[in-house]
Image (cartoon, rainbow, N blue to C red):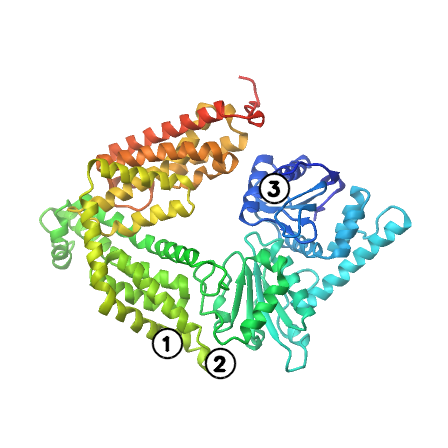
Amino acid sequence: MSELITPELVSLDEDLGAERSSVIRYLAEQVAAQGRSTEVDALYADALAREEKTSTGVPGGIAIPHCRSKAVSEATLAMARLSPAVDFGAKDGPADLVFFIAAPDGADQEHLKLLSKLARSLIRKDFTASLRAARTPADVVALVNGALGIGEPAIAGDGAHAAGSTAAGTAAGDRSSEAAATLGTSPSGTDTTGPAVEQGRSTDTKVRRLVAVTACPTGIAHTYMAADSLVAAAKERGVDLQVETQGSSGATPLDPAVIAAADAVIFAVDVDVRDKQRFAGLPVISAPVKRGIDEPGEMVEEALAAASNPNARRVAGTAGGEQSDDDGGRDGIGSTLKRALLTGVSYMIPFVAGGGLLIALGFLLGGYLITDTADTIVLENNFGNLPDGGLATYLGAVAFKIGQLSLGFLVPALAGYIAYALADRPGIAPGFVAGAVAGFMGAGFLGGIVGGLLAGYVALMIGRLAVPRWLRSLMPVVIIPLLASIVASGLMFLVLGGPIAAITVGLNNWLSGLTGTAAVGLGLILGLMMAVDLGGPVNKVAYSFAVAGLGAGSIDNQAPWQIMAAVMAAGMVPPLAMALATVLDRRRFTVAERENGKAAWLLGAAFISEGAIPFAAADPLRVIPASLLGSAVTGAIVMGTGVTSQAPHGGIFVFFAIGNVAMFVIAIIVGTIISALAVIGLKRYATSKKDAPVAEPVAA
């Protein structure tokens, strides 16, 4: 196994500027200079993207920027001791020790375990003190290898310094073993929860017991640092805490007996908790993984308080989104609602996508009159008894009917998965039932949203009730679905369904009546929303609005289909525009951006707005305004000319589901050219010294 760190990858007492991006760029260049990365720009972009998700500064003047990247050829550590220190987002101030962890996409388990072990070592004051006292890069390499248990821990130098470093290396091994025993992991980082964990428990029946799960998107650094921090904080308070680290180097689930004996659970995670239903019924405290590093004591105290609070939030069942009822109360009502609505729409899309495309195929084969005859043809005809119009009409009727039945799940699926996002698995059945009631009463997708929210919150509240342990297993399977279905669907029938149905009829009539300036204005607004954050929350709101209304479209009411066409066309413009710009003026873009531009052609054609994100991340003040301009024009043209789309996704590849496809293509081309010229103009004339054109590798 090759060395993770070498003296050439260590920089001491460097002034790398005041921004974390400049530090990350420098370290990425060091990795590439040693032949461990194939492309500096790609590695830098991946590391910066990870940094933007969650800052990597941790208490003690430490920062650990890290990423997995296809540009990395072998797992690598690069280290810089900064003077002056740079702010990486830690609460206690800037960082002077920065470790850059660069892992390949397919990093082997042994390397990942070592990287995770290093992250754990960095929360120990003796180890970081030795790093600050190191005189040469070779000293740092010896210290790191000592902490990892590889190589020689002693380093060259004067006697006192060598002794101190050796002690630090020895302490690293001792403390790693101590933390591993407490966490239920071996010093190598392999989880060993099970009977060995029970042996470490106190025999005192009054000992308070907690369990925890830590996980971050990359699964290399924060996952394990949060685990160690929580264990240390619990130990200070005399609490028995067992942690399951769901990281890149693998995870062994906590012993069910350990979970059953726990008083509460802590989720310090930025991603889904695997098999969350194991913790059903436990009081829960949930927060981003970084809080587990920054405020471990507070999280342990909150978990202890929740354990003795009968009204505390509890884990209801399997996870539906990043967080659900167990968010610890840290998310506001707006964030919770947004996450629930987007979850419902994301699970609804497959029904709409398949249904919409099949209905379009039915029209293509059987003509628009198939809507009146499909039921009769499907029930009374077969391959041996074809209807008038022959095989095409028969297949068209079959396709139309399958699509129609698929779209029939639109509202129930929307409601069911909104409830799922709020209350996990126990919310699914009440949500589907409430959605079915909304459809029955003509309340449409608005009724589905209201029914899903009702079902989810009712299921959530019932799931928080303190019940005897013997009743816990029945709660998510029988009791919660039954009671939540009665309450949510009853309210839809008795109180809410009628008024929502009236609002739905009014909304459909308004959309159907949109013509001229009003339609163009709506298209312009939708275009702006699709381009403002390129797949972010605003983009998703516009897309969700279009998809949720798609099922209400018909030959007599094509407004929902027009909205879908405007959203899809406008969302295709930013990546296509960036691709075109890299062709028209190559020198204004880096090598990495030119490569991204090649991929952006296909991404844009397929309606994947995120294809423009690499360009926006590198130059948001030029790329975003240019994208807004072109997408707004495209949305306005589509709505103004009555283009329709019965498919919620697919871009140009679902041309057969698009009405007036020629104008659809023209609108996209116009918007693409406008955005491409705008971004080139901004790069040429709104520049600074650092925006000099990129030199071509070979002179023209």
Spatial distance from mark 3 to mark 2, Cα to Cα? 50 Å
Q: Which mark is residue 260?
A: none
Give the structural element (helix, strand or loop) at label 3: loop
Asked if 657 appears above or below 385 in the picture, the reply is above
Q: Quadrant of residue 181?
A: bottom right
Residue placed under numbered mark 2 in the picture = 469
Measuring from the top left, give residue 635's x and y in whole percent.
30, 37
Measuring from the top left, give residue 573's x and y in whole percent.
37, 35
Asked if 143 appears above or below 189 in the picture, the reply is above
Residue placed under numbered mark 1 in the picture = 478
| Tag in front: 3 or 1 | 1
Mark 2 or mark 1, earlier in chain: 2
Q: Residue at x 50, y 38 (%)?
A: 617
Mark 3 or mark 2, earlier in chain: 3
Spatial distance from mark 2 to mark 1, Cα to Cα? 15 Å
Give the structural element (helix, strand or loop) at label 1: helix
Asked if 108 appears above or below 682 in the picture, the reply is below
* Dot 2 crowding, Cα within 10 Å, few <14, some 14–19, many 20+: few
Spatial distance from mark 3 to mark 1, Cα to Cα? 50 Å
The residue at the far left in this view is: 388
Q: Residue at x 11, y 57 (%)?
A: 376
Q: Which mark is residue 72?
A: 3
Q: Amino acid at mark 1?
A: Val
Do the numbered discs 3 and 1 sit on residues whose CB atoms are within 8 Å?
no
* Dot 1 crowding, Cα within 10 Å, few <14, some 14–19, many 20+: few
Q: Amino acid at mark 3?
A: Val
Measuring from the top left, give residue 141's x and y in whole percent.
76, 46
* Dot 3 crowding, Cα within 10 Å, few <14, some 14–19, many 20+: many
Q: Which one is nearer the viewer's eye here, 421 or 604?
A: 421
